[in-house]
Amino acid sequence: MEINDASTTKEVNENQLAERSDRAILNILQDRERTYLTQIDLPIVTRPASTEIAGALMMAPGAAKSNFSVRLESDPQSTSIKSPLRNSRVEPSIARSGGAIARPGRRPLGLVPRRSRSLTRLLRAPAKVELMGIGIDCLTEKQVIARVISTIRDGSGGWIVTPNVDHLRIIRQRPDLLALINEASLTVADGMPLIWASRLKGTPLPERVAGAGLILSLTAAAARTKASIFLLGGDPGDGEAAAARLKQLNPALKIAGVICPSPGFENDPLQMAEIGNALHSAKPDIVYACFGFPKQEFVIHALRDRLPSAWFLGLGGSLAIVSGRTRRAPRWMQRAGVEWAWRLGLEPRRLFQRYIINDLPFAIRLLIGSAVQR
């Protein structure tokens, strides 16, 4: 009997390609960072049937559920999904007759075990959660670091905003800030009330990404990848002390410069030009601007064009914490969402009006409004 080698080879290749496609989909979804696929994931989908899977799963947490349910097993050899459709791995839900109410579909891959997370998976484009008109990126701290380091290698920069409850309150009072903040490349939640609000809304953010923690973890990643940092702002002496501390923690770290401008510099075109020239000459990969909100956002917006290849982060009082001039709350208070109480205890006169009179009622309104919107 004569065997057609070309046909046999094509069939084997198709089976191998199908298996790789199945594994690619599982690799994206099994780490539990996301339970959905986005447009950026579609290039890895190689089979026509997998496109239907992508369409069934292409929704952020909290979005309206589709009429498709998908079952994927860990072993590619035993993967089986029954479907009346030809070349389809999607099973349409069966319409109920007689007015019976259909049961809601199970969340895709909700029982898939957690796996180790590679850099490639961390770079997947996430969805956004809207709070008070601001789109908050569904990113973990590791994902933020991965995105920054990856784009630095590609020679492109960006801008990270870390809003908290106080920031949202100020933005509600100043519409001009809303348009400014929405220009940022990434926006991550620095405040547990924002996390709670996203959960009440039914679109949960993965975790809090605090600026005081990000300055340490991102700097460590920069040191490992030979990226340089620039410290801008803080009180006199904070920048130098923070630079020394960061260098002690990361001996391989490259510090491109430290500048503590005099008060009112943002309104002085000459001083702003001098800072821009210093950044342009030093060419850092990451710039930490620590002036408090919203001053640091306006400064970053004015300086970004001088150094488009760098990442700018507005991190408020992070330099004071890194330098040791002030202490951050214990870890349990950070996790419980009461770090504000620690800061209030350290500076009651300065922060009582902000935290108790202004922010607390606003936080309550934010949580109630989010629950109503669910």
Image (tube, helix red, strand yellow):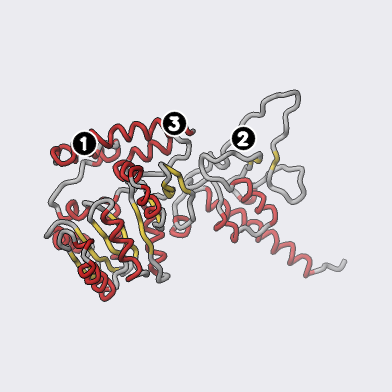
Q: In the rendered picture of this protein, how many numbered marks are placed on residues?
A: 3
User: Pointers 3 and 2 in contact (CB under 8 A)?
Assistant: no
Mark nearest the camera among 3 and 2 is 3
Q: Secondary structure at mark 2?
A: loop
User: Is residue 373 depicted above or below 295 in this figure?
Assistant: above
Image coordinates of residue 42 in percent, x first then y, are 60, 57
In the rendered structure, which disc, 3 or 2, sits on the residue that comes first in sequence? 2
How many angstroms separate mark 2 from mark 1 (CA)?
A: 42 Å
Residue drawn 26% across the image and 59% down it? 289
User: Is residue 224 depicted above or below 68 in this figure?
Assistant: below
Image coordinates of residue 198 in percent, x first then y, are 42, 39
What amino acid is at disc 2? Gly
Q: Secondary structure at mark 3?
A: helix
Residue drawn 70% across the image and 40% down it? 92
> Front-most of 75 and 29?
29
Q: Quadrant of the N terminus?
A: bottom right
> Front-most of 366 and 54?
366
According to the image, label 2 marks what residue?
A: 105
Q: Where, by quadrant of the figure, is residue 237 drawn? A: bottom left
Mark nearest the camera among 1 and 3 is 3
Q: Any mark on residue 371, and which?
A: 3
Image coordinates of residue 61 in percent, x first then y, are 51, 42
In the rendered structure, which disc, 2 or 1, sits on the residue that comes first in sequence? 2
In the rendered structure, which disc, 1 or 3, sits on the residue that comes first in sequence? 1
Q: Secondary structure at mark 1?
A: helix
Q: Any mark on residue 341, and which?
A: 1
Residue 252 seen anywhere in this rendered image of the structure = no
Q: Residues within 10 Å of mark 1 (few under 14, many from 20)?
A: some
Residue 139 seen anywhere in this rendered image of the structure = yes
How many angstroms separate mark 3 from mark 2 (CA)?
A: 23 Å
